[in-house]
Image (cartoon, rainbow, N blue to C red):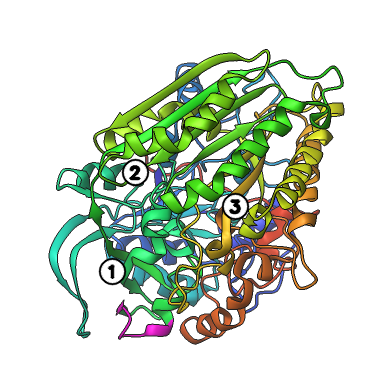
């Protein structure tokens, strides 16, 4: 991490040395380092001074592993490799995202190979911003907004970098990192700003607080936090503004349902507190309309709930795959998916959530009940038939078949860490394709058969490529809120959440060192596996709904799939509070379009980031 006391070579000189053409500037925040509009050294230095020296040049975390890097070190590289899949290590460096495909731009990257010697000869920035501001105060945010507007530079917001669509990085932009906003407090009697509404037991957290930090803090006061499965995720940004689902969703709703007030910095630099009385349109939009596109969050204020013991039933096993490796030829695979779908109509009304994975020769399911006076007793009662069925599957080799009871979320996080480690690994390239599976497909044995047919049919696509490609996995996540919740549409969350039992995610992953052909084929396979389910869910009016935070970055019908009928209203609110489109991210509300040159890394003519001067003070 290099402090920007000086900055990049002047724009014209850089353009001459690199041979990159000097392109005309415009008013859509597309100025890049090789254009005349780029700030001069003295302008960068003055900006850095105005924000207390919190402007830094980006150094990718893999830099020590490249012989041509100025910080090459075999010892440092060994350490980087040892921590490469540690989410907290990756979050502590702007030079890394949680998923490595969002560090690359075309073939330009700084990814040390995890499969052997196959890596680029030089360390490139890829799509990482050339520089970033590690904001410590709201004044730093305000100054950054003024600077990028003055010089027509694209601004990218980043908290933890846990994003499946690459919205935390954009080549040749300036990144604003909010992970330092870590304040947390409990207000027993909370009065909303300039509004008569009062609440009991409200959490106030800074924009940079992660799930594990929030649960550790508020559990000590006897309160539960409606976080998701991954403890390293920042809960106040994209999670808390787009939906936010987890083990409490059925009992208490989505994270956006808990929000009562936000503190923002608007794009014109004003401090603004919004709630149901003050700027209610923005309050509605920020409860489900996505993060990082209307204003910049400082504090998130939300309802807490009494902390209860958490019960979990975990079952893991392997079984023989059919000779053909086709799921349609496996009565075991079909029976397991049918059992999960059939039980859902009982489990959902009783607030049972969980995480389920069934492959051609393995199964891992976790049914979780986090509320009630006797969660373990009720969970055992409601899963008894399911457990009996699973134990008696022919030729099954059971690895785990256990009930657990955790005293709080902190214990639950530790006890379920294996699930996250096995299925939410970072430091990989990942593509996700998803759909919210509507309740109508669980209504009769016939519709359940159709649902299972679609899932099993999709799995069949894996068979001919099982030895050639990395893993593609289906995850069924029953963490949807109570059916019919939010009848007044008080939040902007995708309406599909309120009429679904499952959030189905098809994940394709690869380790750095795979060829581009393998990576492209893995992404294509994930989409092929998902297609039968998408076709089943689709109606004459739409192609179903998906959670934007865990959806396909290449989703073509994204406005409808991500936002449903809310998009037009969200777009109007976006235009009201950010008329210049200062905050713009990939397929967020207000997305300019794929022709925007700042999104070149998604396309066929990528323009990776340009390094700042390497001779900067450490």
Q: Residue at x 61, y 26 (%)?
A: 363
Note whether 139 is above or below 111 in the view shown: below
Picture quarter containing residue 34? bottom right
Assess disc 3: are there few (<14), some (14-19) or many (≥20) residues with their C-alpha within 10 Å of its C-alpha.
Answer: many
Residue 455, magenta (yes or no): no
Labelled pair 3, 1 in contact (Cβ < 8 Å): no
Query: Does dot 3 land on a helix, a strand or a loop?
Result: loop
Query: Does dot 2 land on a helix, a strand or a loop?
Result: loop
Q: Which residue is mark 1?
A: 139
Image position, residue 567 (x, y; %): 60, 77
Image position, residue 350 (x, y; %): 42, 49
Q: Earlier in the sequence, mark 1 or mark 2?
A: 1
Left or right: 381 in relation to 356: left
Q: CA distance from mark 2 to mark 3?
A: 32 Å
Q: CA distance from mark 3 to mark 1?
A: 27 Å
Q: Earlier in the sequence, mark 3 or mark 1?
A: 1
Image position, residue 265 (x, y; %): 35, 73
Q: Residue at x 69, y 65 (%)?
A: 558
Q: Residue at x 50, y 47 (%)?
A: 346
Label placed on residue 166: 3
Foreground tag (3 vs 1)? 3
In the picture, which quadrant includes the N terminus? top left
Q: CA distance from mark 1 to mark 2?
A: 41 Å
Image position, residue 553 (x, y; %): 67, 54
Note whether 359 is above or below 488 in the view shown: above
Assess disc 1: are there few (<14), some (14-19) or many (≥20) residues with their C-alpha within 10 Å of its C-alpha.
Answer: some
Left or right: 305 in relation to 358: left
Q: Nearer the viewer, residue 494 or 111?
A: 494
Q: Which residue is mark 2?
A: 370
Q: Write down the region rendered in magenta.
A: 273-281
């Amino acid at each position: 991490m290099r402090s920007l006391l000086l900055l990049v070579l002047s724009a014209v000189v850089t353009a001459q040395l690199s041979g990159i053409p000097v392109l005309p500037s415009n008013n859509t925040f597309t100025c890049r380092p090789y254009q005349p509009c780029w700030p001069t050294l003295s302008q960068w230095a003055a900006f850095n001074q105005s924000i207390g020296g919190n402007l830094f040049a980006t150094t990718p975390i893999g830099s020590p592993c490249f012989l041509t890097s100025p910080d090459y070190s075999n010892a440092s590289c060994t350490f980087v490799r040892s921590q490469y899949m540690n989410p907290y290590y990756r979050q502590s460096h702007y030079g890394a995202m949680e998923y490595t495909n969002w560090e690359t731009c075309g073939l330009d990257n700084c990814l040390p190979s995890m499969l052997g010697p196959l890596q680029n000869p030089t360390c490139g920035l890829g799509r990482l911003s050339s520089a970033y501001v590690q904001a410590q105060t709201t004044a730093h945010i305000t100054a950054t907004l003024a600077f990028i507007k003055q010089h027509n530079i694209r601004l990218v917001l980043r908290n933890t970098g846990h994003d499946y669509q690459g919205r935390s990085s954009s080549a040749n932009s300036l990144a604003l990192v909010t992970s330092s906003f870590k304040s947390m407090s409990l207000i027993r009697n909370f009065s909303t700003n300039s509004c008569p509404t009062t609440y009991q037991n409200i959490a106030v957290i800074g924009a940079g607080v992660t799930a594990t930090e929030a649960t550790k803090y508020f559990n000590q006061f006897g309160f539960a936090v409606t976080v998701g499965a991954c403890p390293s995720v920042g809960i106040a940004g994209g999670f808390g503004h787009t939906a936010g689902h987890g083990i409490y969703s059925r009992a208490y709703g989505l994270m956006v349902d808990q929000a009562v007030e936000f503190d923002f910095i608007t794009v014109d630099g004003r401090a603004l507190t919004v709630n149901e009385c003050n700027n209610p349109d923005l309050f509605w939009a920020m409860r489900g309309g996505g993060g990082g596109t209307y204003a910049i969050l400082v504090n998130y204020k939300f309802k807490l709930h009494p902390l209860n013991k958490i019960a979990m039933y975990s079952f893991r096993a392997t079984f023989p795959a059919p000779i053909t490796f086709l799921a349609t030829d496996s009565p075991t695979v079909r029976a397991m998916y049918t059992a999960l779908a059939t039980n859902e109509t009982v489990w959902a009304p009783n607030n049972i959530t969980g995480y389920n994975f069934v492959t051609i020769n393995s199964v891992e399911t976790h049914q979780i009940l986090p509320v009630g006076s006797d969660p373990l007793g009720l969970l055992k009662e409601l899963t008894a038939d399911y457990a009996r069925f699973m134990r008696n599957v022919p030729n099954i080799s059971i690895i785990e078949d256990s009930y657990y009871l955790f005293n709080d979320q902190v214990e639950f996080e530790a006890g379920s860490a294996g699930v996250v480690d096995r299925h939410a690994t970072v430091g990989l390239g990942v593509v996700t394709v998803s759909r919210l599976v509507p309740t109508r497909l669980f209504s009769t044995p016939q519709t359940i058969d159709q649902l299972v047919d679609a899932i099993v049919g999709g799995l069949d696509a894996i068979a001919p490529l099982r030895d050639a490609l990395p893993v593609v996995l289906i995850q069924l996540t029953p963490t949807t809120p109570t059916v019919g919740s939010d009848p007044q549409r008080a939040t902007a969350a995708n309406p599909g959440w309120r009429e679904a039992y499952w959030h189905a995610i098809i994940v394709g992953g690869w380790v750095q060192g795979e060829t581009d052909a393998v990576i492209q084929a893995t992404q294509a396979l994930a989409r092929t596996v998902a297609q039968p389910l998408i076709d089943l869910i689709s109606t004459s009016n739409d192609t179903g709904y998906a959670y934007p935070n865990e959806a396909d970055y290449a989703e073509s019908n994204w406005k409808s799939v991500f936002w449903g009928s809310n998009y037009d209203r969200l777009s109007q609110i976006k235009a009201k509070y950010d008329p210049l489109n200062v905050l713009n991210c990939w397929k967020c509300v207000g997305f300019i379009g794929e022709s925007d040159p700042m999104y070149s890394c998604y396309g066929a003519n990528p323009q990776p980031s340009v390094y700042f001067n390497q001779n900067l003070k450490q």
